[in-house]
Image (spheres, rainbow, N blue to C red):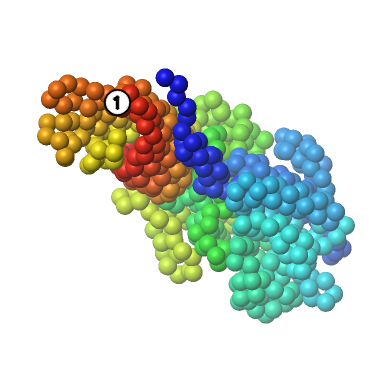
Amino acid sequence: MNRRCPGTLLAALVLLAASQVLAAPPVRRALVIAHNASDDPALSPLRYADDDGVMWTELLRRLGVETTLLVEPDEETRRTGAAVLATGARPPTPEAVSQAVESLRGAIQADHATGRRTDVLLVYVGHGNTDEAGRAYFTVKGGRLDRTAFYAQLVDPLGADFVHVIVDACRASGVVGSRGQADAAVLAELRGTLEREQLAARPHVGALFAESDTGETHEWSRLRAGVFSHVLRSGLMGGADVNGDGAVEYSELAGFVAASLQGVKALPARLSVHAHAPASEPRRPLVGASPEGPSLLLPAEFEHARISVEDEEGRRLADVRRAEGQPLALRLPVRDAYWVRTPTAEARIALAQLGAGVPRLRPRELQERGPVEDALRRGLFSVAFDRSFYEQYVSTSSFVPVDFVPGRVGPVRIPLGAPVLGSHSPWEVGAFAARTPLGLGGFITGPSFTLRTAAPYTLGVRASYALSLLPSVDGVTLHRFSVQGLAGIQSPERVGPFLEAAAGWSLVGVKYRGGVQGDPTVLSGHLSGGMVARMDSWRMRAGGFIGTELITADGEDSWGTTWGVELSFGR
């Protein structure tokens, strides 16, 4: 018998293809602008803004963010391995900035045409200053970005669903916020008007920046980076992921920065950190779960609290301060080897050795570097960032806190070197109830067994058996056995939706007192949707489905519809 795929099944598959992009994670893109020089002869050039730009680019790409870098590396930076990342990067001129924004805008429009939502991170590292009229601006090569230009030329033209602004520069509030003057009284006023004016008019925009009472920010030669940029990057690598879900939200990153800087008390000017989540979605993550790559797990039993990770060129990649018994996962840029250091010990770990765990640390020699560097060395990352600190910090702020899984006090315990999301068994077992085929009354029920790949895009196979005692006929039972291929998409979050299409083969048989009849070649397909929830090591899937099938009964082919519900569990 010649059978053709049912039209409704084809429609369902088309609907699935269209809806996959709707439920997919957002596309994340970034523009990094870094510039050492200033157009003010009274301001000395920065040493490490270009290094920061390169390291921001490397980190964001490691976290799955498509990143454009505008930088003109100095001779010192060109002599390091970081110069590879700057290859092909254009100097941060006003023309290059405009072209980069236009390119991003085109990519975002293409994303929207396919139904994808987009997040853009705008990172600026360099000099901030005020002009003769007291207007604050950021310096680029051969030009300036004042408040008007910053929003009119960078933020607003993008057309992104969300924009996350990260600034490591002097007098950042004058540009990111409202109006700029050099005196402390006006800077204090700007902090109070930040949300009311610029960001409040753009509910899809969030911002993180730091400044001091004098308008200065700080570089540290030991880090070969700006202090604020280094702390932010350490948090985004996983140090700020206080609930262990793989994403870093504004409240987590702001709390991490507050803890990391709290112990620094002897600098000439203390940094003040400003963080404002997008008003339209306060829990919008800056970064989501990262792709697979080098991941260092510091297990709960790891004896050291203060940890630094460096590469073999001495470039500091990350710093964290753990609480006792707190596990921590850091997503590292790719290096041939890493140095894991504490104030008193150190160990070298080759990339291939990450999965074997942290080796025994050996004693290291301490070096004093003067009062300012000693203040940073002793104070920076001296306060542990854990759930207790986070909850106390959020309780005194306007942030919406993250969710914690009951019974879990820290990040997800994952094998060293595994993806941050961890691993799970692909098997699920469940039960379902569906409308009885052939238009017979009642329902068929039974168990199901599913093998399915991990989120977000899923493929799998499902086998099920169902039995029904037909309510209108004594002694008659209907049996159904099905095997179907699956394709779908589901949210990678702890609780989120899924959508899935299935198509395959079924055997339907009816047993009655006079014999047995059936169709062993039933074509069937359905479209299902619902929610997936992850609870510690368990996950639960609940959903409904509607489908179609072609059954031969009494020598005639008959199209029929079916619908039902299913509940399944996996680990």
Horizontal relation, residue 483 to residue 12: left or right = left
Question: Can residue 21 be seen at all in this image of the molecule?
Answer: yes
Which residue is at the front of the view, 345 or 212? Answer: 212
Horizontal relation, residue 531 to residue 446: left or right = right
Q: Is residue 182 above or below residue 358?
A: below
Q: Is residue 171 above or below residue 259?
A: below
User: Label 1 is placed on what type of residue?
Assistant: Asp
Tag 1, which secondary structure?
loop
Q: Residue at x 65, y 75 (%)?
A: 197
As drawn, which residue projects farthest toward the top?
1
Horizontal relation, residue 74 to residue 187: left or right = right
Tell me the residue that label 1 is attached to. Answer: 554
Question: Dividing the image into 4 quarters, which one contains the N terminus?
Answer: top left
Q: Position of residue 31 (x, y in %)?
A: 71, 50
Question: Can residue 222 be seen at all in this image of the molecule?
Answer: no
Q: Residue at x 71, y 70 (%)?
A: 174
Which residue is at the front of the view, 220 or 146? Answer: 146
Q: Is residue 234 above or below residue 472?
A: below
Which residue is at the front of the view, 352 or 155? Answer: 155
Which residue is at the front of the view, 452 or 88? Answer: 452
Q: Position of residue 229 (x, y in %)?
A: 64, 53
Q: Position of residue 179 (x, y in %)?
A: 73, 75
Q: Residue at x 37, y 32 (%)?
A: 558
Horizontal relation, residue 454 to residue 167: left or right = left
Q: Is residue 476 above or below residue 565?
A: above
Q: How many numbered dots are placed on residues in this image? A: 1
Q: Residue at x 51, y 26 (%)?
A: 353
Q: Quadrant of residue 143?
A: bottom right
Q: Position of residue 508 (x, y in %)?
A: 29, 27
Question: Dividing the image into 4 quarters, which one contains the C terminus?
Answer: top left
